[in-house]
Image: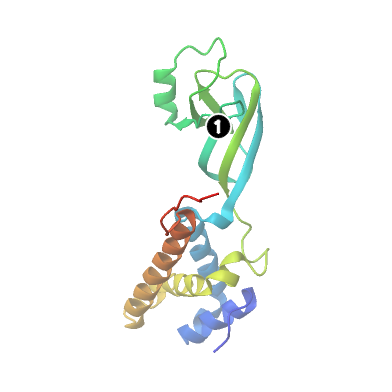
Amino acid sequence: MAVITSYSTLQTAVADYLARSDLTSYIPNFIQNAENKLYRTLNLRNEETALSLPITSGAAAVPSDFKALKFAYFDQSPAQLLQWLPIEQLYAEYPNRASGSTPKAISREGASFVFGPSSVDGTLKGIYYAKKAPLRTTDPSWYVTNAPEVLLYGALLEATPFIVDDQRLGVWQAAFADAVQTLRDENDNAEVSMGQLVQRVS
């Protein structure tokens, strides 16, 4: 059984688990589909990227690798986090787009971030989740290095249409769900201190 350390060894491991030579040519597709689903459904700390964008004429350009916003604020002192609103709600609550002021809310309209009320020129700061390059072009990927079992079981489940009656599917589904939950728990635990804060005596 191949130890997963790269795109190639992941393909080998998937082939070993499937034990179906007629599916070998499909394995890159299985991996790609599994990887895409993970990137769409999980926002992890390794995807966090600093946001620093100029706001001009009430809008800021959305980064090309943007996936989701963690938080954002207008660069001023004191800083105040912007509330994310659906675009329809932002325009309903802030219909006057003529004059700019310090924004309180943010939304996305096409390739731009827009604000409520319409923002004065300045800088948008914060953190966003960035799309990662696929494993086939970035080898090894973060998943291969840190959570190879998630990719392995995810790719195996992508073979479901070809092996519908295979009894192993239930095992792989349970293993995949457990691996994803473990990944979520690790990510959440890294966000929150698990110990009680103690005041330091100087």
**Position above or below: 21 against 126:** below
**Position above or below: 107 against 151:** above
Residue found at x 50% / y 63%: 33
- Give the x, y percent position of residue 35: 52, 63
- Give the x, y percent position of residue 143: 56, 67
**Position above or below: 68 against 195:** above
Q: Secondary structure at mark 1?
A: strand
Q: Amino acid at mark 1?
A: Tyr
Residue 93 lies in quadrant: top left
Residue found at x 62% / y 78%: 5
Q: Return the residue at label 1.
A: 73
Front residue of 160 and 22? 160
Q: How many marks are shown on the rendered structure?
A: 1
| Horizontal side of residue 121 vs 117, given as left or right | right
Residue 2 lies in quadrant: bottom right
Front residue of 160 and 3? 3
**Position above or below: 147 against 49:** below
- Give the x, y percent position of residue 109: 52, 30
Residue 161 visible in the snapshot = no
Residue 120 visible in the snapshot = yes
Front residue of 78 and 89? 78
Q: Quadrant of the N terminus?
A: bottom right
Residue found at x 36% / y 73%: 173
| Horizontal side of residue 106 vs 133, given as left or right | left
